[in-house]
Amino acid sequence: MAWQAPVVGHRPSPGGGRRVTIRGRIVGLAHNDADLVEFLRRAGLDEADISLDDPHLVEWRGGRAHHWEAA
């Protein structure tokens, strides 16, 4: 099985925002970077350790990183 980042920001939804999964579990719909950071904080990561541009932590699917609106 191929390695996968533990956090996935899925394709932007038609209404805006991205479904977020952490280790395969859906944790919510993020509408901006601050929402995503909050999900990670609630999952136990220290804010100082969170880098949304780190591909070993976050995989952005179906659109550009930090892009929250549907195309």
Image (cartoon, grey):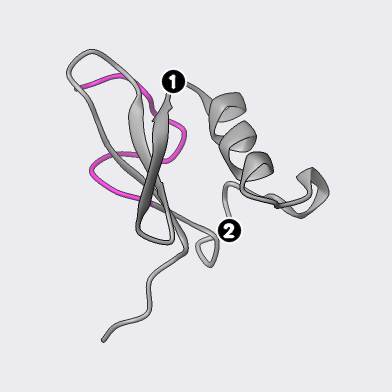
Front label number (2 vs 1): 1
Question: Dot 2, how many residues are within 10 Å of its Cα: few (below 14), some (14-19), or many (20+)?
Answer: few
Q: Residue furthest bottom?
A: 1
Query: For residue 6, which numbered disc appears in the image?
Result: none
Residue at position x 22%, y 25% in the image: 13
Residues 29 and 62: in front is: 29
Mark 1 crowdedness (10 Å alpha carbons): few <14, some 14-19, many ≥20: some
Q: Amino acid at mark 1?
A: His
Q: Up-down: is 30 above or below 21?
A: above
Side of 4 relative to 71 (left or right) = right
Marks 2 & 1, CB-CB < 8 Å contact: no
For the C terminus, the quadrant is: top left
Secondary structure of the residue carrying tag 2 is loop
What is the magenta segment's predominant secondary structure? Answer: loop
- Range of residues picked out in magenta: 60-71
Marker disc for residue 54:
2
Identified at 54% across, 34% down, the residue is: 36
- In the rendered structure, the answer to whether residue 4 lies left or right of residue 44 reads left
Q: Secondary structure at mark 1?
A: loop
The residue carrying mark 1 is: 31
Q: Tell me where residue 45 appears, x and y as whole percent.
A: 71, 52
Spatial distance from mark 2 to mark 1, Cα to Cα? 19 Å
15 inside magenta stretch: no
Give the farthest residue toward the top. 15
**Residue 10: quarter of image:** top left
Residue 6 drawn at (x, y percent)? 47, 63
The N terminus: image quadrant: bottom left
Relative height, residue 23 to residue 3 (above, below): above
- Amino acid tagged 2: Asp
